[in-house]
């Protein structure tokens, strides 16, 4: 399969593929896995089946973790949705495009095949999880040891929940097209380089 160098470069810059040879990416990147989402589009909701992880090629995605009462923003070069996919769990969060974005999806089988060929991908997954655990520990210790309100406000800046949806009910997109991944992927591919 011949893949445009620009597409390889876009996905290759993602932290999931850090240290992976360009030739490997060129042979394994699938143009059909790219899709675009408009700002406000719901990518998945809590309770959905976990069928894919997502790489952010362009844009920004907001992830709301209901149990943790926390919102995180993911940007270009980030990936998300891997924990539930690897653990075969239902989604524990909501993901919404915070800006118009281009995403690249990898399903469970594809991820397994990629890891078999390049163990560095597994290392990158583990490194991200280790970094997130360290951040959460730092955040917890910082909150417990905070002596002033000002430092607590800085540590908790990302915890403000000012969203258009809540965790108590399943959220839905305003358009049926937004729910169909094949439609999103087809629309996104129209705007990608050939």
Image (cartoon, helix red, strand yellow):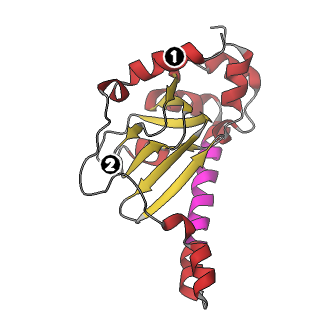
> Which x, y percent locates residue 145?
59, 88
Name the residue nearer the viewer: 84 or 63: 63
SS state under label 2: loop
**Image quadrant assignment for residue 51:** top left
Q: Is residue 131 within the magenta segment? A: yes
Q: Is residue 36 within the magenta segment? A: no
18 to the left or right of 64:
right
On the image, numbered disc 1 is attached to which residue?
Answer: 32
> Which x, y percent locates residue 68?
41, 65
Q: Are there few (<14), some (14-19), or many (20+) residues within 10 Å of tag 2?
A: many
Quadrant of the snapshot with the C terminus: top right
Quadrant of the snapshot with the N terminus: top right
174 to the left or right of 78:
left
Which residues, given as a range, are shown in magenta? 122-138
Classify 54 as above or below 193: below
Name the residue nearer the viewer: 160 or 139: 160
Q: Residue at x 40, y 55 (%)?
A: 163
Labelled pair 2, 1 in contact (Cβ < 8 Å): no
On the image, numbered disc 2 is attached to which residue?
Answer: 46
- Per the rendering, the mark at residue 55 is none
């Amino acid at each position: 399969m011949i893949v445009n160098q620009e597409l390889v470069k876009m996905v290759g810059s993602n932290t999931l593929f850090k240290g992976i040879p360009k030739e490997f990416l060129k042979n394994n990147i699938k143009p059909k896995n790219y899709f675009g989402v408009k700002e406000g589009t719901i990518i998945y909701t809590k309770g959905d089946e976990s069928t894919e992880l997502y790489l952010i090629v362009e844009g920004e995605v907001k992830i709301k973790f209901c149990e943790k009462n926390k919102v995180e923003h993911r940007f270009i070069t980030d990936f998300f949705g891997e924990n539930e996919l690897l653990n075969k769990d239902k989604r524990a969060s909501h993901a919404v495009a915070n800006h118009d974005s281009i995403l690249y999806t990898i399903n469970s089988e594809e991820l397994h095949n990629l890891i078999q060929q390049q163990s560095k991908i597994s290392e990158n997954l583990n490194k991200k999880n280790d970094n997130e655990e360290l951040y959460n520990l730092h955040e917890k210790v910082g909150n417990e040891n905070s002596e002033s309100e000002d430092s607590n406000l800085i540590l908790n800046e990302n915890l403000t929940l000012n969203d258009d949806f809540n965790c108590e009910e399943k959220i839905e997109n305003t358009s049926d097209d937004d729910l169909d991944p094949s439609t999103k992927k087809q629309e996104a591919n129209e705007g990608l380089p050939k």
